[in-house]
Image (spheres, rainbow, N blue to C red):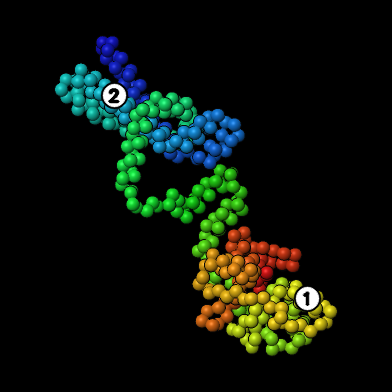
């Protein structure tokens, strides 16, 4: 075997290794946990900072890796063909094609990519220096390719509505990744995911049913009204006339507490606040807007003229943060008879 063939074989091995390097880099940078890398970079890790910088230019990074992969593949295939033809004559090109297909598939694609996927962060950090060098070396080519790619993409998507970057499910997966990486506490993750689902919740899902609501009826005797207002633990009470379907307003207990303590006659109508009515199939977003409009912390749920129950600001907040307790709560609010305000 003359020296030229020997040098060709060494060069072929080098190019296959280069192919494996770029292939594993592509997988590593595609699967690396950006959140964890960002946290390490913020802690002063220079390699992580370099990886993060490359990820922030991912289109150019990917173009760089693909250019390196293709150059390595083309050169390796050419050299393998030259060597095989030199050894086997005309059939050498066939042998070279078969040989390179097997070698590239096993040793430059499958094995390196599997290793890189399982150790994406370590691989990305280890390769970052060379990838950064190739990034700048291939700049004229990658700028051209990314420019053409952007132009074609803009042409194909012109006039079309772009899909959101993340769907709700994908966003929740991202939040879970942040939680697993330690960037978010469990309760913070739960609040964010609850906020995503917040607009899908219907009023009927969180309302307190009428059977569990304490309300004041104007037909009650003044003494019974006084006893009820003074002894219930709620700061707001719906006031009705001759039945729950005829709600007159909301009584703020604090507005009449002083008069009741002094034994003065209570004028219910004079102390009522406007009632916020809401349909049971309205969303929590709509409920919130209505409550803001009425400046009320309580809404009465009605459908076809019938009162179905009440819903409070606390009921909405508990969909975000979970059960809210005060000093008198002995068990979760969802097990209480009436929603607290």
Residue furthest right as drawn: 262
Q: Residue at x 53, y 67 (%)?
A: 286
Cα–Cα span, label 2 and label 1: 90 Å
Q: Residue at x 36, y 28 (%)?
A: 140
Q: Label 2, on which residue?
A: 75
Determine whether 90 is above or below 238 in the image: above
Image quarter of residue 74: top left
For the C terminus, the quadrant is bottom right
Q: Residue at x 61, y 70 (%)?
A: 294
**Which of disc 1 and disc 2 is earlier in sequence?**
2
Q: Residue at x 71, y 74 (%)?
A: 252
Find residue 148 and report its horizontal and vertical position in percent: 32, 37
Determine whether 71 is above or below 87 in the image: below
Q: Label 1, on which residue?
A: 257
In this picture, residue 202 sits left or right of residue 147? right
Q: Is residue 66 visible?
A: no
Find residue 76 and report its horizontal and vertical position in percent: 29, 24
How many C-alpha atoms fall within 10 Å of the one at disc 2: few (<14), some, or many (≥20)? some
For the N terminus, the quadrant is top left
Q: Which mark lies nearer to you, 2 or 1?
A: 1
For the residue pair 159 and 327, the one nearer the viewer reads as 159
Image quarter of residue 132: top left
Determine whether 315 is above or below 137 in the image: below
For the residue pair 275 and 324, the one nearer the viewer reads as 275
Find residue 11 and report its horizontal and vertical position in percent: 32, 19
Find residue 149 and report its horizontal and vertical position in percent: 33, 39
């Amino acid at each position: 075997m003359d020296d030229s063939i020997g040098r060709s074989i060494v060069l072929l091995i080098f190019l296959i290794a280069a192919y494996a390097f770029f292939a594993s880099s592509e997988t590593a940078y595609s699967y690396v946990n950006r959140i964890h890398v960002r946290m390490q970079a913020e802690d002063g890790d220079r390699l992580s900072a370099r990886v993060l910088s490359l990820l922030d230019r991912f289109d150019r990074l990917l173009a760089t890796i693909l250019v390196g992969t293709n150059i390595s593949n083309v050169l390796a295939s050419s050299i393998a063909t030259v060597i095989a033809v030199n050894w086997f004559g005309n059939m050498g090109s066939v042998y070279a094609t078969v040989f390179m297909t097997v070698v590239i598939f096993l040793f430059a694609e499958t094995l390196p990519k599997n290793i890189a996927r399982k150790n994406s962060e370590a691989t990305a950090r280890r390769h970052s220096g060379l990838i950064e060098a190739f990034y700048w070396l291939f700049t004229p080519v990658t700028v051209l390719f990314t420019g053409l790619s952007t132009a074609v993409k803009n042409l194909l998507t012109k006039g079309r509505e772009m899909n959101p970057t993340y769907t709700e499910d994908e966003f929740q997966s991202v939040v879970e990744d942040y939680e697993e990486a330690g960037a978010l506490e469990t309760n913070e993750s739960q609040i964010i995911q609850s906020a995503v689902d917040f607009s899908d919740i219907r009023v009927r899902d969180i309302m307190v049913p009428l059977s569990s609501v304490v309300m004041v009826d104007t037909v009650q005797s003044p003494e019974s009204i006084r006893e009820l207002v003074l002894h219930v633990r709620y700061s707001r009470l719906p006031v009705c006339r001759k039945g729950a379907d005829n709600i007159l307003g909301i009584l703020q207990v604090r507005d009449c507490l002083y008069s009741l303590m002094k034994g003065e006659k209570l004028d219910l109508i004079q102390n009522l606040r406007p009632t916020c009515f809401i349909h049971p199939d309205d969303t929590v977003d709509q409920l919130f807007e209505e409550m803001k409009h009425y400046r009320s912390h309580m809404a009465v749920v009605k459908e076809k003229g019938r009162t179905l129950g009440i819903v409070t600001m606390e009921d909405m907040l508990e969909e975000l943060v979970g059960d809210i307790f005060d000093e008198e709560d002995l068990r979760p609010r969802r097990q209480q008879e009436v929603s607290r305000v």
